[in-house]
Amino acid sequence: MRRQSLALLALWIAGVGCSVGPDFQRPAAPTTRGYTPEPANATAPVAGKSQRFVDGQSIGAYWKLLRCSALDTIVSQALASNPGLEAARATLRQSQDSLRAGYGVFFPQVDAKAGASRQLYNPAPGSLPSETFNLFTLSGTVSYALDIWGGARRQVEALGAEVDAQRYTLAGAYVMLTSNVVDAIIAEAAYRDEIDATKATIVLLREQVRIANAQMTGGTVSYANVLALQSQVASTEATVAPFEQKVDQAAHLLAALSGTDPANWHQPSVALSDLQLPEDLPLTLPSQLVRQRPDILVAEAELHAANANIGVATAAMLPNLTLSAGYGVNGIAADRLFAAGSPFWSVGAGLAQPIFHGVALYHQRKAAVDARDAAAAEYRQTVLGAFQQVADQLRGLSHDAEALAAQTEAVDTAARAMRLIQANYQAGIATYLQVLVADGQYLQTRIGYAQAVAQRLQDFVALCVALGGGWWNAAPSSLG
C-alpha cells in the first residue's frame, strides 16, 4: 500500500500538478448588431442600380467579385511569388518549430558521455612512488524536472499562442498583399482614363485653334484669341506627363508585389470599365468580425501569450523539484571498461526554493500582470479601430454612390454644353472665352468621373479588407 501511495504521488507531481496563473479566457464577442448609428442597407442608385449590403455573405476571394480575369491573373501571380508573403510563411514555420522544441520540457533529459585521459597520481610523500595511468570512462545520465506548478506548461502555452499570432500575421500579409495589388490596378486604370480624357480634350482644343486661325485670317477674331487657345493647349498637354508617371509607378509597384523586377514585368491590360462593382456587397456581423479579422486575432493571441507568462513568472517563485540518475563504467584500459568493479551509479533528487532574489521574482510577476493588462487594452483598441474602419467604408461607399451619380450627370451636362458652345463658336456667335470655359469644364468632369469610379472601387476593396479579407477561404498553399 505504501509503494502504491508513493507511485500515485509521483504520478500526480509529474503529470497532473496544478498550473499556477490565470487560465486564459477568450474575450467575449460584442453583442452590437451594426457599425453605424443607422443600419447600412443599400447605396444610392447609379445608372439605375444600387448596391445592397448583405449580412453574413462570405467574402472569399473578394477581387473575383469585380469579374475581371486579367485582375485574377495578376493577383494569383502575386500570391505565388511575393517575397514578403514567403517571409511571413517562413516566420510561421519558425514559430512552429520553436513550439515543438518547447515540448521537450515534458520529457526526461538523457545524455551520454565518453572520456579518455592520462593521469599522474602522486601518493603522500615518502609512501608509494608516483604512477602514470590511463582512465577510460563511459557514462549516462537522466534528469527530469517535475513541472509541479505548471510553469513549463504555461511556457509551452505561450509558445502556442505565439504560433497563432504568426499564423494570423501571415493571414494579414495575405490580405494586405491582395488589397495592394487590386488598389494598384484600379489606380493605374483610373490614371489611364484620365490620360484618355485629357488627350481627347487636347484634340478638341487643337481643332479650336485651327478654327481660330481661320477666323483671324478672315478678320473676325484677334490674334490674342489664337494665343489664348494655344496657351490652353500647352497647359493641358503638360498635365499628361504626371498622369503617365503615375501609371509607370503603379506598374512598377505591381512588379514588386508580384516578385518581379520592373524590367521583366509584363501584365495584362486592365481598363476601368473592365471592373464591375457587384450589386451585393458583403457585410459581416461584429460578433463574427472579431473571430475573422487578422489584426484582431493577432491581438488576441498576444493577449493569450501575455496571460500564460503570468503563470511562468508565478511558477518561478515556487519550489522546483528535479530527479536525476546516472550510471557509468570506468577502467584503466578500454577493454576493461566492463570488468568487475568498474560500474558506478547515482540516484538523487534536488529541491530548490527561491528565498531572496532582491524582490526580483515578485516584480517580474507583477510586470507579467502589467503586460497582460496592456495586451488586453491593445486588444480592445484593435477591435474599436476595426469597427471604425468598417463604419468608414460603409458610409464611404454610400457617399461614393452619391458622388458618382452626380459626376455622371456632370459629364453628360458638360458634354452637351461643350457641343453647343463649339457649334456657336463656329457660327461666330460665341466667344473664345466661352469655348475655353466649356472645354475646361468637360475635361474636369471626365477626370472627376474617372476618379469617382476608382474611389468607389477602392472603397469596396477597403470594405472587404476591413471585414477580414476572406483569408479563411484562401487556398492552403497561400497561407503556408
Image (tube, rainbow, N blue to C red):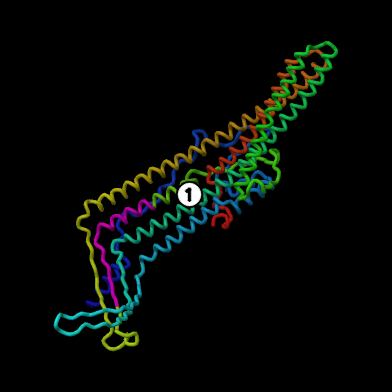
Does the magenta run of residues contain 315? yes
Up/down of 361 relative to 394, above or below: below
Up/down of 29 relative to 393, above or below: below
Q: Judge left or right: residue 429 versus residue 65.
A: right
Could you tell me residue 286's position as x and y percent? 48, 43
Residue in the foreground of this view, choosing between 61 and 478? 478
Of the 4 image quadrants, the one containing the N terminus is bottom left
Please provide the residue range marked out in magenta: 305-326
Residue under the point 63% across and 40% down: 250
Can the viewer see residue 95 in this picture?
Answer: yes
> In the orientation shown, which residue stands out farthest toward the bottom?
340
Could you tell me residue 478's position as x and y percent? 57, 55
Within 10 Å of disc 1 (Cα), the crowding (few <14, some 14-19, many 20+) is: few
Q: Which residue is mark 1?
A: 291
Q: Judge left or right: residue 72 versus residue 129.
A: right
In which image quadrant can residue 23 be found? bottom left
Up/down of 302 relative to 333, above or below: above
Residue under the point 42% across and 57% down: 160
Can the viewer see residue 413 in this picture?
Answer: no
> In the orientation shown, which residue stands out farthest toward the right?
218
Amino acid type, mark 1: Arg
Could you tell me residue 458's position as x and y percent? 60, 38
Residue under the point 69% across and 24% down: 235
Mark 1 residue element: loop
Residue in the foreground of this view, choosing between 230 and 133? 133
In which image quadrant can residue 44 be found? top right
Up/down of 92 relative to 236, above or below: below
Could you tell me residue 480's position as x and y percent? 54, 57
Does the magenta run of residues contain 133? no
